[in-house]
Amino acid sequence: MAFSFGKGYWKNIKEGLEREWVISNGIGGYCGSSIINSLGRMHHGYLIASLHPPVERYCVLSKTDETLITDNHKYSFACNYREKESDNGHEYLQNFTMDELPNFTYEAAGTFVKKTLAMEREKNTVAIGYDIMCGPAAKELVITPFFTYREHSNTTKRKDLEFAVNLQSDRIHLTPKANEDIDICMYCDQGEIKNSKRKYSGRVMLQTEIETGGCKYIESLTAYEIHVPLKPFERKKISVICTIEKDFEKDAFKTIKAQRDRLKKIKAKSGYEDDFLQALVQTSDNFIVRRESSGLKTILAGYPWFSDWGRDTMIAFNGLCLCTKRYDDAMSILNSFAKYEKDGLVPNVFPDGGSAPMYNTADASLWYINAVYSLLKASGRKKDYDEIEKNIFPVMEHIIYYYEHGTENSIYMEEDGLIHAGSGIDQVTWMDVRVGNWVVTPRHGKPVEINALWYNALRIMEQLSKKYKKDSDKYAEMAEKAKESFNKEFWNDKEQCLYDVVDKEVDSKVRPNQVYAVSLPFPVVQGEKAKLVVSKVLEKLYDTYGLRTLDFDDPEYKPFYIGKLHDRDAAYHQGTCWAYPLGALITAYVKAFGTSKENIEYAKKLAEPLKDHLRDGCIGGIAEIFDGDGPNISRGCYNQAWSVGEILRAVSEIYGEV
């Protein structure tokens, strides 16, 4: 499925900055910008390299601008938003298309310049291919690279742009003084690299950052230009490569073809014919990357800034790995996280910089058990059963043992067979925002989704214990007790749904977490109560692109995720709409109400708006969050793993029900 956009989408630069794109290299590096080739945020760049895969990400090439020269005119395709006079090259941009890759097509004086970008797989290399159909007056194309060296979440000022330079006719080597181990190489297969008249880009304003209280501008080194001669009516292809690798493919069009072919194979392997599902399969590839520390695969939580988080990985796992039939990658991910299991907990965060993982999560380990079960159900391969019995099942036993007897973060089983989690200022569920000592959404006690996952995990352990000829009775007894206690303690008779947290006092706020009591493979709530839970979530929380995090009638409801970080944190789980729980709602609806044709059509309707969203925000992807009130503008990470994964999982399942 290709997404194509014309001039109507960029009547001005601000409009053009509303849509973005991203591609990746499989080791945490990425390439992304706006559809008008204008920088809108710190995380825009053509080559954002991962120095310690998949983290330590540094931008080394922000973009390239082009100028077409004829006998009588210079046509600048540069598009840069500035405080005073902006560069309005978007006026020459005829079309932006995102198929497997981003493509820009410019036209001036009858000359058409198509620019396509791709990244070499598992290399910090970006290939820029120019396919030019020259008009009657074409004379030269001048390509201006914007060099930098900065951590991808930081801005750059002129004083930071210091490089040792080795300029050659077909390439340039830049060594940043901030890191002399890095060699930034730009190569061009034709033309000549020359010094430019303008050493720096000047202040390029970052509109997205301005709107969210971030850095207002960025500067780049623009001291060099690539000059390529053109002739009237000739067809010319130009390869420009930027890399920090010693070895790289010099033909940009070979890299472009390799990446196109690779993504086409991934989409074909999934077996889906539906365009919506095909688009989600394609974007899912961006998130599955190799972790250097384990030598195995992991999942990045979201672009452009998140690393691999345990909770996000395990929630996204089914959609990204199993619905795409990437079973070997799935097993690699399970083994990767198994290496870091500690006292029954799998890591929540692998921080940048190589420091120790953080285990501040009560649900990642339970989602991990669910992921193991889902892989076995999906693949059915004997080798997966064997490997899990040998390497993974002992980790699962650890998880259950420590949850039963107690581990970090006040996680332990109470006498009623349910799990308690969190205390003080610890935030160990997915609603985890804390500002200093202010716990925005306190959920200490027995959270509803943690205990739905706990029951699910016990049933999975019961089944696998039978498979592996181990004692399954203890898990069956624990599950029965947990189910009985859950249905007794969590039912909110007044609201006809589930309490969000049960402790000495109950939390009766209506939140989406209760839907997991119905949606998981082993539902802890069934029958009429399941229908009531789903109905309450639909009535109070469903809103176009996902589920609100709080009932819109609640006095604490925050309708918009806007303003400075403090204001956004206050709204993050207090009304902001999240895409990923919509997957659980779709599954829960079908489980509760059945698989009649009418019910399947209703379930499809719940996801229908996301088809349109694929043409908004990050093209082909699904954002992390949206405002709770209309017009439900996308916010946060522009392409989120669990948003894509859960919608792909849920929608592919209901399409299979037809």
Image (spheres, rainbow, N blue to C red):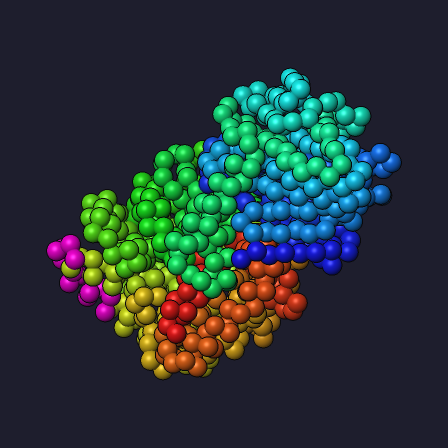
In the picture provided, is 459 more to the left or to the right than 604?
Answer: left
Kindly indicate the quadrant of the structure image that contains residue 227. top right
Please name whichever residue, 475 or 493, is drawn nearer the observer in this view of the structure. 475
State whether residue 629 is above or below residue 25. Answer: below
For the question of whether residue 635 can be seen, the reply is no
| The C terminus sits in image quarter | bottom left
Task: Identify which residue is drawn at 36% across, 79% down.
Answer: 594
Q: Which residues are magenta?
A: 467-480
Question: What secondary structure is the stretch in magenta mostly built from?
Answer: helix
Please name whichever residue, 237 or 334, is drawn nearer the observer in this view of the structure. 237
Residue 338: x %, y % from top left: 31, 44
State whether residue 551 is above or below residue 313. Answer: below
Residue 350: x %, y % from top left: 44, 41
Residue 378: x %, y % from top left: 30, 58
Kindly indicate the quadrant of the structure image that contains residue 631. bottom right
Kindly indicate the quadrant of the structure image that contains residue 587. bottom left
